[in-house]
Amino acid sequence: MNRYKIAIIKGDGIGPEIVDEAIKVLDAVSAKENFELNYEEYLMGGCAYDVKGVPLPAETVEGCKNSDAILFGAIGGEKWDNLERHLRPESGLLKLRSELGVFANLRPTNVFDELVDASTIKPEVLKGVDLFVVRELTGGIYFGQPREKGIDRAYNTMVYTKEEIRRIAVVAFESAMKRRKSVCSVDKANVLEVSQLWRETVEEVALDYPEVTLSHMYVDNAAMQLVRNPKQFDVILTGNIFGDILSDEASMISGSIGLLPSASVGGKVGLFEPIHGSAPDIAGQGISNPIATVMSAAMMLRFALNENNAAERIEKAVQMVLKDGYRTKDLADYGAKEVCSTSEIGSIIADYVAKI
Ligand code: NAD
C-alpha cells in the first residue's frame, strides 16, 4: 500500500474549517482507493505569529520540505494588517513558496453546468469551459533587477532567462498532454524583447510535443478572448505578471470564488490551496464553501502523488453533489435543493466519494 506524508497548514479565518472538510474527503478517498495519508499539522500566517512571533516558523519550512505534498487553507486578517511587512501573514506564504522553489502556478477553471447562472457571463458562452492556466511564478517583472523607486522616476525590470521559460513551458506541455493537447502561449512579443525570447523558447519546447497544438496570443487579446469566448482555451501558458492578471480574470468567469483550486509546483514539494483568501467576514459561522479546498486536495492527489483515480473520484463526487442540488450559502441562489453548512457539505462529498 502506498503511504504519503502530507503537511497540513490550516492558517487563519476560514482556513481551519475548509481544510478539515478536505481531510474528511481525503480520508474517504484513501480508504476507497487503498492508500494511506499521514497528516502533520504546521502553523503559518497570523496564527503562527500569535504563537511563535513569526508568520513562517522554521519547523513549518522543515516539515513541509520533508513531506510528499502540502495542503494549505488560507491566511490573513485585519488583526495582523498593521504589523511590519516581514511579520505579516502573506510574507509567510511568499517565503514558503520561495523556500520550496515552486515556479509553476496551476489554476484550472471549470464551469459546473449547474452553476452557469452564478457567473456574470452568459450561460451559452460559459457552458463547457474547461481551461487551465500555467503561470510562471518566480521570475519576470516582480523579481527582476534593477528596480528602484525614486522621487520623480521609478522602474522595474522584466527579465526571463531561457531556462526559466523552458521549464515553465515544459509544465504547460506536460499538462496539455493530460488534457485536450492544446497550448496557447500568451505574451507581448510585438513590444517586449523578453516576450520574443519567450516565444522562441516555447516554440523550441513544442518540438518535443508533436501531439500538442501550439498557438500564440498577445496578452491584451487574451484578456478580451477570455470573456468573449473562453471555450477556445485548453492550457494557457504565460509569465508572472500576465498570469497574475489573467488567472484572476479566468477564475471570475466561473462565478464563485469558493470553488476553484490551485497548485504551486516545480520544486521538490508542491503546495495545494484554494484561490480565495481567509474570508474573515464569514469565519467561524460554518457557512464557508470548502469545495475549492476539496478540489485542491484532488489536484494534490493528481500532481503530487500520482493517485489519478482518487483525484477523479473526488472531482466526480463534487460534480454529483452540485448536480443533486447541495449548496453552501454562497451558492444558495443557484439551483439549491438544500443549503448546507461547511461541515455538512464536506460530509456529503465524502459520502459520495465512498459510494460512487
Ligand atoms: P477573500 O478571498 O478572503 O474573500 C473575498 C470574498 O469572498 C469575501 O466576501 C468572502 O466571504 C468570500 N469568500 C472567500 N472564500 C469563500 C469561501 N470558501 N466560501 C464562501 N465565501 C468565500 O479575499 P479578501 O476579503 O480580499 O481577503 C481576506 C484576507 O485573506 C486578507 O487578509 C487577505 O490578505 C487574505 N488573502 C489570503 C490569501 C491566501 O491565503 N492565499 C489569498 C487572498 C487573500
Image: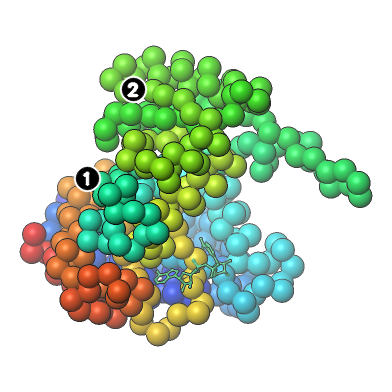
Q: Which mark is residue 164?
A: none
Observer-nearest residue: 216 or 99?
216
| Residue that mark 1 sits on | 308
Q: Where is residue 152 in the image (x, y as percent from the top left)?
A: 91, 46
Q: What element carries label 2?
A: strand
Callout 2: 10 Å neighbours few (<14), some, many (20+)?
some
Relative to 109, is 154 on the left or the right? right
Q: Position of residue 146 (x, y in %)?
A: 79, 36
Q: What element carries label 1?
A: helix
Q: Is residue 88 above or below residue 296?
A: below
Whether residue 50 can be seen here: yes
Q: Quadrant of residue 292?
A: bottom left
Marks 2,1: beta carbons within 8 A: no
> Which marked residue is nearer to the observer: mark 2 or mark 1?
2
Q: Residue 213 carries which label?
A: 2
Amino acid type assigned to the residue bearing label 1 in the image: Asn
Callout 1: 10 Å neighbours few (<14), some, many (20+)?
some
Q: In this view, does 319 lie above or below 332?
A: above
Determine if the C-beta at disc 1 is less than 8 A from ligand 1: no
Q: Quadrant of residue 239?
A: top right
Identify which residue is drawn at 48% across, 29% down. 217
